[in-house]
């Protein structure tokens, strides 16, 4: 059975294990895997037809660079230090590091990422990977719609912050497998509404033990956390 359909509580490492290592780096991903996660969550932007794993558009928080990634060349971005001497990794490098040991939750952050991500996934499917190695999530419904049109077999997760009135309709239209919301907005009614549609419900970003316990008691399906060892 796929990890995505597991009956146990899933532990998803947020940007790897960013409570321990620089976020969205290979170091952080390897740390998450060593802590026993079911999957790692990472963020993707497109730069010059290449996919880079970084959260912010602005470079200053997570690297020694300045300015916006959209104004920089791929070579310049790869030259930066993303913490502890780590580089901003390509999505391909992340796939290679994970190497099917755990699942990969790819959050589409930047515009025009859908086609490139699907192309990369297809190249790994041709190498023997399976659709269940991946789930693609985004707040950007347009990008998720693009993914669905390009390959309807790819698992999709709809990211929410809050409870929009029409989220169930949007999720149904996108044929998602998972709804991912900020834990502050998740209660039993929300989880039941998601489960009634046959979808999974994940919570982000749950870091302290009280909140982890609360989510566990609500029978959440997955927890995205900076500290995987706490799950």
Image (cartoon, rainbow, N blue to C red):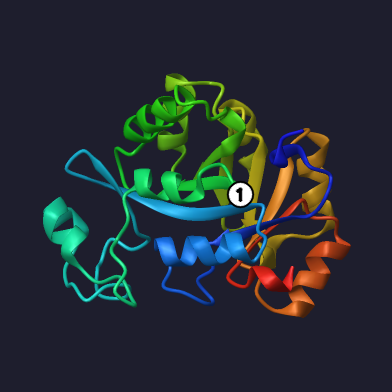
Which element carries disc 1, helix, strand or loop?
loop
Are there few (<14), some (14-19), or many (20+) residues within 10 Å of tag 1?
A: few
Q: What residue is at 64 percent from the left and 66 percent from the top?
A: 35
72 vs 151, left or right, is left
Residue farthest to the right? 217
Q: List x then y, in percent, for residue 216.
A: 83, 63
Relative vertical location of residue 40 with respect to residue 226 in this rendering, above or below: above
Q: List x then y, in percent, for residue 99.
A: 51, 44
Q: What residue is at 24 percent from the left and 42 percent from the top?
A: 50
- Quadrant in which the C terminus is drawn: bottom right
Q: Which one is in front, 65 or 215?
A: 65
Which residue lies under the disc numbered 1? 164
Q: List x then y, in percent, for residue 48.
A: 16, 43
Q: What residue is at 48 percent from the left and 25 percent from the top?
A: 125
71 vs 107, left or right, is left
- Quadrant in which the N terminus is drawn: top right
Q: List x then y, in percent, for residue 46.
A: 27, 45
Q: Can residue 87 be seen in this view?
A: yes
């Amino acid at each position: 059975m796929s990890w995505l359909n597991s009956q146990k509580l899933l532990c998803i490492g947020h940007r790897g294990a960013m409570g321990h290592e620089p976020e969205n780096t290979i170091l952080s991903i390897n740390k998450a895997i060593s802590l026993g996660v079911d999957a790692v969550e990472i963020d993707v932007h497109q730069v010059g037809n290449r996919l880079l794993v970084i959260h912010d558009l602005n470079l200053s928080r997570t690297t020694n660079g300045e300015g916006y990634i959209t104004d920089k060349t791929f070579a310049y971005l790869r030259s930066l230090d993303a913490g502890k001497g780590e580089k901003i990794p390509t999505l391909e490098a992340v796939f290679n590091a994970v190497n099917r040991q755990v699942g990969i939750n790819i959050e589409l952050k930047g515009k025009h990422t859908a086609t490139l991500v699907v192309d990369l996934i297809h190249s790994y499917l041709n190498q023997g990977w399976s659709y269940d190695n991946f789930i693609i999530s985004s707040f950007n419904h347009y990008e998720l719609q693009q993914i669905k049109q390009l390959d309807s077999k790819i698992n999709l997760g709809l990211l929410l912050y809050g409870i929009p009135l029409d989220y169930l309709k949007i999720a149904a239209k996108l044929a998602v497998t998972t709804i991912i919301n900020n834990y502050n907005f998740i209660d039993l009614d929300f989880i039941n509404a998601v489960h009634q549609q046959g979808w999974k419900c994940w919570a982000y970003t749950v870091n302290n033990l009280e909140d982890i316990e609360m989510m566990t008691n609500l029978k959440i399906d997955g927890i995205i956390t900076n500290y995987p060892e706490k799950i």
